[in-house]
Amino acid sequence: MERIDFSDLNSDRPLKGKKILLGVCGSIAAYKSVFLLRLLQKQGAEVQVIMTNNAKQFVTPLTFSTLSQNPVFSYLWHESTGNQDWSQHVQIAQKADLILIAPATMNTITKLACGICDDAVTATVFSASCPILIAPAMDKDMFNSPQNQKNLQTLQAFGYRILPTETGFLASGLYGEGRLLEPDIIVEQVLFTLTPKLLLNQNLLINVGPTQEPIDPVRFISNYSTGKMGIAIAKWAYRMGAQVTLIAGAITAEIPPIPIQVVRVQTANQMFQAMLEHFPKASIIIGTAAVADFKPQFSQNQKIKKIDNQEIINLVLTQNPDILLELGKQKKTHQKLVGFALETHNELENAKKKLLKKNLDWIVLNSTQEKGATFGHDTNKVYFISSNQVIETELLPKEQIAIQLLQIIASMH
């Protein structure tokens, strides 16, 4: 049995060791930058804030320096030091792994598009060679003005990543485009930018969560699956550059704010049809869903009522399609097919049989014998099994399991 050290990506603090410059401009949305700073730190990043003079009207440099534990850079010239640090913008720009300007005002966007370099933010950006993310925030008419839209297009052509804005109520009292993205969404885009693109140009199809098989309008057969494992895989596959289609059963886990295609289904048959529909364009297919093996032979149209003095109710069950087995029968050209197996005994033997029977490239074995693993937990312990390899993991966060699986899949292409 083989153990492999997967140490290059850490799900707990994926930005550990990354130096991020957070540019803050003069917008009422600057208060969100405080929360953004904390979320970036939570992901392991070292953050230094750079500010325009107008930004100080909304949040003080003391707030950012205290929280970041780094000095705030906001002056190009310091008379008190005899201008000895006039090149500070160059020094911090060259050390940065990423520059994020959030909020980015129309004023700063215009300066960047036109090459105007007269404050700490613009001077630092123009001195950088790292990725630059722009998160605009302004009133709706300002945001939609032809000048602003042209400048955003110019920056995009220069290679800057322009994040979208949200639609909602604005500080002016108007309703429309221009709201700064919520901090958790911005952080997700930072993670996307800095995660190695191991799955670039890959289309990943994954099913997650339990299915529900109706007994009557108010009852169903299901299981304890939450969908956490599959959602973790979908999230990291997106960060690694894949186009992701998520076929979701009755999940209780939250889908993160990432741009993936989500198809909602309830029953095993619905999930099977959705997987067949998206199979041809997929290059990677992963089956994590806990599909109900059985369904009632007949589903009642009305609620089944209790019957006095009758203790036993007979429910006739029939088998659902085995989705992975049927997908394995499809003609695979470029596709890689990965399944999950949950076993209670003879785990390795039964998983290897499923690998062969279902024509899988890899199967991930879960065991109910491991405390803190499988349904409902944030951790798991698995075996990655192929026709000639067995890799055992420790008890790890499910996101770390997802990373390891995707690294294995990436090595197959």
Image (cartoon, rainbow, N blue to C red):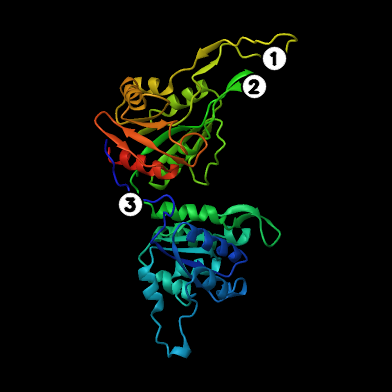
Task: Identify residue for label 1.
Answer: 304
- Residue 105 location in percent, x, y? 55, 66
Query: How far across and down, in percent of the image, does residue 132 sit?
Result: 42, 62
Place of residue 157 in the rendered image (x, y in percent of width and height, measured from the top left):
41, 58
Looking at the picture, which amino acid does disc 1 mark? Ile
User: How many residues crowd around disc 2 within 10 Å: few (fewer than 14), some, or many (20 or more)?
Assistant: some
Residue at numbered disc 3: 8
List x then y, in percent, for residue 269: 51, 20
- The secondary element bearing badge 1 is classed as loop
Residue at mark 2? 219
Crowd rating for badge 3 (residues with CA inside 10 Å; few <14, some 14–19, many 20+): few
Residue contact between numbered discs 1 and 2, judged by CB atoms under 8 Å: yes
Q: Residue at x 60, y 67 (%)?
A: 27
Label 3, label 2: how far apart the Cα atoms are:
46 Å
Q: Is residue 318 above or below residue 156?
A: above
Camera-side residue of 282 and 372? 372
Q: Image point 54% across, 69% down: which residue?
A: 25
How much space separates mark 1 and mark 2, taking CA atoms?
A: 9 Å
Which of the two labelled residues, at mark 3 and mark 2, occupies the earlier sequence position?
3
- From the viewer's side, name the closer residue of 58 and 160: 58
Q: Is residue 58 left or right of residue 128?
A: right
Q: Earlier in the sequence, mark 1 or mark 2?
A: 2
> Which amino acid is tagged 3?
Asp
Name which residue lies at 46% across and 66% down: 47
Name which of mark 3 and mark 1 comes first in the sequence: 3
Q: How many marks?
A: 3
Left or right, 248 with reference to 309: left
Looking at the rendered structure, the secondary structure element under dot 2 is: strand
CA–CA distance in space, label 3 to label 1: 55 Å
Decide: marks 3, 2 in contact (CB < 8 A)? no
Asked if 353 appears above or below 50 in the picture, the reply is above
Q: Which quarter of the image is occupied by the N terminus? A: top left
